Image (cartoon, rainbow, N blue to C red):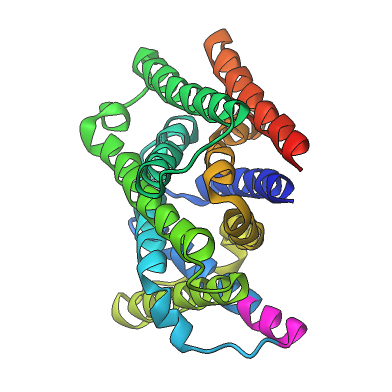
Amino acid sequence: MWFIYAIITLLLWALADLFYKKGADEKDKYSHLKTGIMVGFVMGIYATIYIIMKDINFNFLDIIKYLPVSFFYILSMIIGYKGLRYLQLSISSPIQNCSGVITSLLLLIIFRETLGLLDIIGIFIIFIGVLALSIVEKNNSEEKKNYSKKVVGLIALIFPILYCILDGMGTFLDAVYLDKLQLISEDAALIAYEYTFFIYGLVLFIYLIFIKKEKIAIKNEKDRLGASIFETIGQFFYVFAVSSNSTLSIPIIASYSIVSILLARIFLKEKLNKNEYLTIFIVLFGIIILGISEGISG
């Protein structure tokens, strides 16, 4: 089932990526904070409903226990939201999702895992495809005459690079907590993370409304709301994918930038060139190989 969970997570987070970009306002210096508020509130509501529906006896100390994982995830997302104000989705998403490289390498090195030949081939192909896509998208952006210098400048590229590093560390810790050492249950991890994000969103809300006297128009928040919903539902499937098979599910999920770019091309009216199609095919081929491997081993 881990393969199915990973594919569902990939699709949901790709949709979230699209709505994050649509909701990012370059003219609004608080745009990334407003996104954080919306995600936090949606996650808090979802976690509460989840506890009630499944009748879970949640220990709020698990929020502290899971805090190292939540910290890296939330910090990476803050940086990712801010970077979307300056970078096109087709550039930021592939770079950000190279975090799977960091995570899988750490897991393989530290836990000295032995993988089957198909697993190794599949992971390698996915990583090559995602890395190639980030290079292709960066070169494409530099060729566009109407692109401002800040978009392809070093400062703008720092955001997805930092996201990549922080998210990679968070995902590694998640694999340790949920799969390798099983320090916390899937339900507890999911609820702890979502309540931590809710607390973060609440702090931001108080900061913007009462300190900065900023107004938030609910009717203008539909894109952020859409992103928050897809992000939150994706988090549910992500937790169960990682807890079942972190080493193989992580590279699949990390390649959701492929679908993000396809969606950006469709809904943001951008075009794909032959190099982009090639890298997308490479990643999809790698995912198919891992799917075949799962079918054989299952």
Q: Main secondary structure of the magenta part?
A: helix
Residue drawn at the location 56% of the way across and 24% of the way down: 121
User: Which image quarter is the C terminus in?
Assistant: top right
What span is in magenta? 47-55
Residue 272 appears in view: no
Percent x, y for residue 142? 34, 17
Residue 227 appears in view: yes
Residue drawn at the location 42% of the way across and 16% of the way down: 140
- Report whether 164 appears left or right of 149: right
Percent x, y for residue 51? 67, 84
Q: Quadrant of residue 99?
A: top left
Q: Residue furthest left?
A: 154
Percent x, y for residue 161? 31, 39
- The residue lying toward the viewer, choosing from 219 and 22, is 22
- The residue lying toward the viewer, choosing from 218 and 128, is 128
Percent x, y for residue 227? 59, 55
- The answer to whether residue 48 is magenta is yes
- The residue lying toward the viewer, choosing from 148 and 60, is 60
- The answer to whether residue 240 is magenta is no
Q: In this rendering, is residue 220 above or below 146?
A: below
- The residue lying toward the viewer, choosing from 237 and 274, is 237
Residue drawn at the location 54% of the way across and 50% of the way down: 246
Q: In this rendering, is residue 35 above or below 58?
A: above
Q: In this rendering, is residue 161 above or below 38?
A: above
Residue drawn at the location 51% of the way across and 77% of the way down: 192
Q: In this rendering, is residue 265 above or below 63?
A: above
